[in-house]
Image: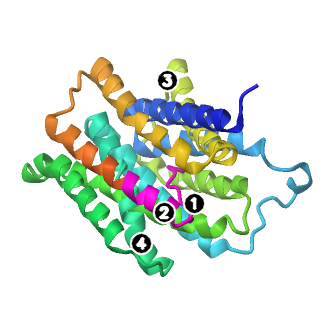
């Protein structure tokens, strides 16, 4: 029988694996319109969530007293999701994952304005280190006018606001309702892309595209379970395994070899986010940044 901490580690590990596999499929799906991929993420992402809705709430499960905050959370999440999809299709996998680790940096900044938190010198230094890491990773793209490097940063900005919004929503809303509204909003948005022309997938491609939604939905649920069973400080470092997976998948599938600058920048970003995380744990805030895709 596994202990609670061991269960927490297990759920975090399979969550990271699911997100990593989802990223691989999204990168593979570049022959399909983004809107069509969004549909599969939204529609099939609803399936794991539906199993969590209590039986006595099936009739009115969608009711909420905080519709505006849900709308803001979904809007920021959609911007983040579209940005990461575009980035994954046009940049090396390890580069996108490395920059995505910068989300806690932007959350620290947003928390000043949205949560009225005081950020002291210790965390400002961590933010500075993280920005240097992002610049080191992105510099080749900016100098050659490769604007696709902007999309992972937009993802971080969107994800950072999502973290703030979920922190507020979770005080009154169940996790499954927050997840339902987001997956539903993804599906609705995808319908507005029909005019771009959708491609009829083969049976194999249909299965893979469906897995984007299922993996995304399951990954978020497993992430929640991980934080339920174990202390956040113990399991969060496992999230950085995503970079290892990205390097392995990128190399064997697309012959991508991360540059020294990418690895150095990733190291600085990870150190920065880890410092911010440890500082928040020291202050007893129990803050975590999850992908919520």
User: Is 290 one of the magenta-colored residues?
Assistant: yes
Q: What element carries label 1?
A: loop
Between the residue at mark 2 and the residue at mark 3, the CA separation in whole angstroms equals 43 Å
Between the residue at mark 2 and the residue at mark 4, the CA separation in whole angstroms equals 14 Å
Observer-nearest of 252 and 237: 237
Q: Mark 3 points at which residue?
A: 205
Classify residue 85 by image quadrant: top left
Q: Give the range drawn in magenta.
A: 274-293
Between the residue at mark 1 and the residue at mark 3, the CA separation in whole angstroms equals 40 Å
Instruction: Report the quarter where the N terminus lies.
Output: top right
Residue 64 visible in the snapshot: yes
Pointer 2 local density, CA inside 10 Å: few below 14, some 14–19, many at least 20: some
In the rendered structure, find residue 286 and report the number of the disc placed on it: 1
Compared with 89, 228 (above or below) is below
Q: Which of marks 3 and 4 is nearer the N terminus?
A: 4
Compared with 39, 83 (above or below) is below
Q: Earlier in the sequence, mark 2 or mark 3?
A: 3
Residue 201 location, x and y as percent?
A: 49, 26
Classify residue 48 by image quadrant: top right
Observer-nearest of 151 and 4: 4
Q: Name the residue under label 4.
A: 110
User: Is 92 one of the magenta-colored residues?
Assistant: no
Front of the two marks 3 and 4: 4
Q: Are marks 1 and 2 in contact (CB under 8 Å)?
A: yes
In the rendered structure, find residue 280 and report the number of the disc placed on it: 2
Between the residue at mark 4 and the residue at mark 1, the CA separation in whole angstroms equals 17 Å
Q: Is mark 2 on a helix, strand or loop?
A: helix
Number of numbered markers: 4
């Amino acid at each position: 029988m596994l202990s609670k901490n061991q269960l927490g580690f297990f759920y975090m590990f399979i969550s990271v694996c699911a997100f990593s596999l989802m990223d691989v499929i999204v990168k593979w799906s570049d022959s399909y319109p983004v809107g069509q991929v969004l549909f599969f993420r939204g529609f099939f992402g609803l399936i794991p969530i539906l199993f969590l809705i209590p039986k006595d709430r099936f009739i009115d499960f969608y009711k909420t007293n905080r519709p505006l905050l849900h709308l803001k959370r979904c809007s920021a999440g959609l911007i983040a999701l579209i940005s990461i999809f575009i980035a994954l299709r046009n940049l090396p996998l390890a580069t996108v994952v490395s920059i995505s680790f910068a989300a806690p940096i932007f959350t620290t900044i947003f928390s000043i304005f949205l949560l009225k938190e005081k950020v002291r010198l210790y965390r400002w230094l961590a933010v500075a280190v993280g920005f240097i890491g992002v610049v080191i990773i992105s510099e080749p793209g900016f100098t050659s006018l490769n604007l696709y490097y902007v999309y992972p940063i937009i993802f971080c900005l969107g994800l950072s606001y999502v973290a703030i919004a979920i922190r507020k929503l979770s005080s009154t809303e169940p996790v499954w309702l927050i997840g339902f509204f987001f997956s539903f909003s993804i599906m609705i948005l995808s319908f507005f892309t029909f005019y771009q022309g959708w491609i009829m997938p083969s049976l194999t491609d249909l299965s893979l595209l469906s897995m984007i939604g299922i993996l995304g939905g399951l990954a978020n649920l497993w992430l929640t379970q991980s934080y339920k069973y174990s202390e956040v400080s113990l399991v969060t470092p496992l999230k950085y395994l995503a970079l290892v997976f990205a390097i392995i998948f990128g190399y064997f599938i697309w012959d991508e070899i991360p540059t020294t600058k990418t690895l150095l920048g990733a190291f600085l970003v990870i150190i920065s986010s880890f410092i911010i995380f440890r500082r928040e744990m020291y202050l007893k805030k129990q803050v975590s940044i999850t992908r919520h895709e």
